[in-house]
Structures are given as C-alpha cells and as structure tokens.
Image (tube, grey):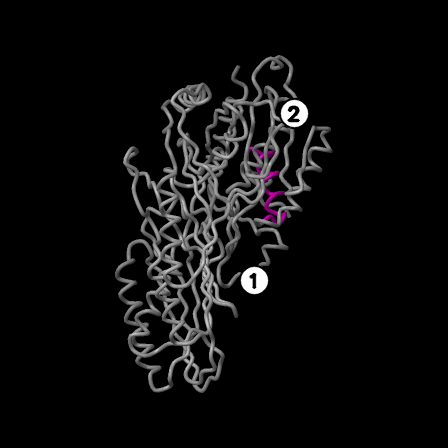
Amino acid sequence: MRVLSELEPKNVFSFFEDICNIPHPSYKEEKISNYLVEFAKARNLEYYQDSLYNVIIIKEASKGYEDVAPIILQGHMDMVCEKTPDCDKNMDEEGLDLEVNGDFVSAKGTTLGGDDGIAVAYALAILDDDSIAHPRLEFVCTVSEEVGMEGAAGIDVSMLKGKKLLNMDSEDEGIMLASCAGGCSAQVKLRLNRTEMTGTKLRISISGLTGGHSGVEIDKGRGNANVLMSRILRDAAKKAPIFIVSVEGGKKDNAIPRECLSEIIVEADKAEAVKAAVEETANEIREEFATSDADFNVTTELSDGCSVKAVTKEDSAKAVALIQSLPNGIMRMSQDIDNLVETSLNLGIISLDESGICLRFALRSSVGAALKNLKNQIACVSKTYGGSVEFTGEYPAWEYKKDSKLRDDMVNIFEQMYGKKPTIEAIHAGVECGILAGKIEDLDCISMGPDIFNIHTTEEHLSISSAKRMYEYILNVIACK
C-alpha cells in the first residue's frame, strides 16, 4: 500500500517512496543502482553504471534550450541506517515503513534516508517529465557518500559536458552552501592480551543520547557514547581492577554515537563498589549533558560467578587510557567565518575482537594544514600506547568561489520566489562538490535542499511543504537561460 500517493509533488513523492522501499545502505547500493538503470532504460535515456554502482543518466535539452549550458544534477543513493533498540527491521534487506504526520514524512523506528533520497527523487521526477523546459541534464548519483564519499572519488565523469552543478544534499531550505570541509577516516587499532578471569560480570549500557551528524551537529556539544563509556570505565577502574570482556558502540564513523555497550568482569567482592562508581559517573554525565542529551541513560546489570576470557587488567587500563587520550569533538573554530567549525573529529565506532580494540574516527577540516596536524596528533597518541593508525578516504575541501554566475542566478531566482535573499554559507560537513570540482575543470557548484530534520537519527523527518517549494525552485533554476 502506497503511503505518500496523496502528497505533492506527486511525481517526486512517488519516486521517493520507491527509493524508500529499496534497501540502500552504504556499500549495499546494487539494488537501488539497478533501479536507476532500469529507469533510464525505460525512458531511452543515455546512462552509465560503473563497477562501484555509481550511475550517470543524461537527458538532452528540450526544444529551445539546445544552446543553453548543461546542468549537472547531483546526489547520492546510499543512506545512513540507524534504528531504535526495539526495531527488528533488517535494513540491509527490508524497505522502510513510512508515515505521514502533518507536514512531515518519517520512517517508523528507523532513519528516513531523506539524506539523500529526496535528491534522487527530484532528479528522477525531472528526467521523467517531458513537459519541463531544460538544457542538457546530467544526473550524477554516487554510492558510499556517507562513509567517506568513496563513490565520488571513484567515478568517471569524462562524458559530462556541464560546468554548473546543483548538489541537492543539503537540509535547510533557504540556506545554500558554497564551501565545505575536507576530511578523511582514521582507524586506530591496539592489540590486547586476554586472560581467564572468574568473578562478577557487569553489563554497562549507555543509551538515550541525541546523536546526529558529526559534521552538522558537532558544534551542539552532544554526548558521544563511545567517549562517555571510556569515562565510565576509567572511573570504575579507580575502585578495582577491571577486565574488559566486550565493548561495542556506534555504527558510522560520521554519526555521533548514541549507544555503547560494554561488559567487564571484576573480583566478586569489588562488584558493588564498581557498580556504585559507574552510577556516580553516570550521574555526573547526566548533569553535564542535561541540556543537549536529556534522555541520557546508563544501566548496569550484575552476573555473579562468571568465568570468561577477558582483556588483562593492564591492557584494559591501556585501552581506556588510549580512548581518553585521543582527541574528540571540536578542535578549532574558523578564524574567517563566524560560528563555523574549522577542525573536528568524531569517534564514531568502537569495537573489540580477539585481536584487540578498534576505534574509527571521522576527521574534518576546512584547512589542509590543520587536517594534517590532526592526523599527526592521532598517530602520535596511538604510537605512544603501542597502537597503529590507518587513514583512508581523504577528500578535499570545497573552496569558496568569489565569482560564481550560478550562485548569482540562484540567489536572484530565490529572491523572486521567496521575496528575500537566501543565506550563503560554508559548512563543516563534507559534500561531494569538492571531489567533483577536482575532476571537472572550472566547475561552479551550489549545494541546497529542503528542510530535513535530525538526519542520521531515528527522529529524521522531511518537510513536505519545503520539499514542494524546493522542487519548484529547482525547476526555475534549470529553466533559466
């Protein structure tokens, strides 16, 4: 049963619902990629699909627009998959359960994927409608944007003719992006020894944090479940030696983790003292983050008489100290743009296996030298504790163009429609414009989109009215000669 069939624009929301019905997490985009190919085939449109499953679809100019400069429409097909603890949906295999509440579309128990499903829906609706006036349109739809923009890094764009690009991967109507940070991912590993240990096991669970996108929300001061768990374990170890059995937190390095679970084992006669220390630290954190994370919660369950293989007390202490020593959050604010984060990092994923502990960070900076320094800092701390670090997926910053005809035209069209000028901003989060600008000489880019709230969280919701206005705005932009 279709849920969005009565929403306007009908074509946009019809394609958006199709997209939501196809599982499309990062690294598993084959199904949605093939859907895009079938769309192009059915309409006899030129298309390209590469081995990564990136897709490019081209539609030649409508009558009267043959001599107008081509426009590149751009978005990504993967989504961040998060779900509530009580949601049993397999997001690798199942579509979303959409719901409409007033002016908003959301998904029951999961992220919505409006970032960036709405961009794909916009592009398909435009390509599908032969009544729309437009120059040559080149739709570039990438994979793995949410895990380091790997699709954009690997895509071949040599067949494109456009020098103007509309990136539809922003979430604030009326705010247009003209610059973004560069960044990379970091994976820190520390080998840990294990031993047989008998005692009382404590299962410590952090939940209820607000979370969010590590680029967009890093300046909100929200709690990071992985970092807070290391703080709890640090204080617990002051009461008695702890032996870490397991620790798991976060799913994406670019999402501020909301939950973390750790199991430790201690000597039986120390269990109550350790539990009390956990509760004391939890209360301190609750007070500290009362505004940003009002639903923060910590639970501790005790199991007596356990015999398990656990990390030695020395290596457990080393692992906790490593996490506590590594930086996290905002490192520096911009000296040139008010209220813009220049450099930051986010400990998005923590995991433990037989070989040791693994920490995965998303690093961002709009200043190349600052990113280099942050990488060196992480490497230095990791080496001090006997760990190793690997940096992957580095992408360039998208630098601001002082002279941009595309930006000028878009500002004028916005002012005609809305009766006011849009806000032009730089953003700390990464968008693919920087990578594509490195592939296409003299590329002129703007990033924009409708209002989407709480992206990358289970509270994500898309404004229906904003989606409609922005679609009409895009049509006016591509019709501009």
Q: Residue at x 64, y 18 (%)?
A: 62
Position of residue 469 in the picture relative to residue 161 (left or right)? left
Q: Residues within 10 Å of mark 1 (few under 14, many from 20)?
A: few
Q: Position of residue 71 (x, y in %)?
A: 56, 23
- 109 w.r.t. 192: above or below: above
* Mark linked to residue 88: 1
Query: What stretch of residues is rendered in magenta?
Result: 9-24
- 293 w.r.t. 24: above or below: below
Q: Residue at x 51, y 28 (%)?
A: 166
Q: Foreground residue, 156 or 306? A: 156
The secondary element bearing badge 2 is classed as strand
- Examine the structure image and report whether residue 305 is included in the region drawn in magenta: no
Q: Position of residue 264 (x, y in %)?
A: 41, 75
Q: Residue at x 57, y 50 (%)?
A: 25
Q: Give the image quarter of residue 209.
A: bottom left
Q: Give the image quarter of residue 327.
A: bottom left
Q: Which residue is mark 2?
A: 59
Q: CA distance from mark 2 to mark 1?
A: 41 Å
Q: Foreground residue, 168 or 251? A: 251
Q: Residue at x 63, y 55 (%)?
A: 93
Q: Position of residue 134 (x, y in %)?
A: 59, 20
Q: Residues within 10 Å of mark 2 (few under 14, many from 20)?
A: many
Q: Position of residue 10 (x, y in %)?
A: 59, 34
Q: What amino acid is found at the position of numbered circle 2 in the picture?
A: Lys
The secondary element bearing badge 1 is classed as loop
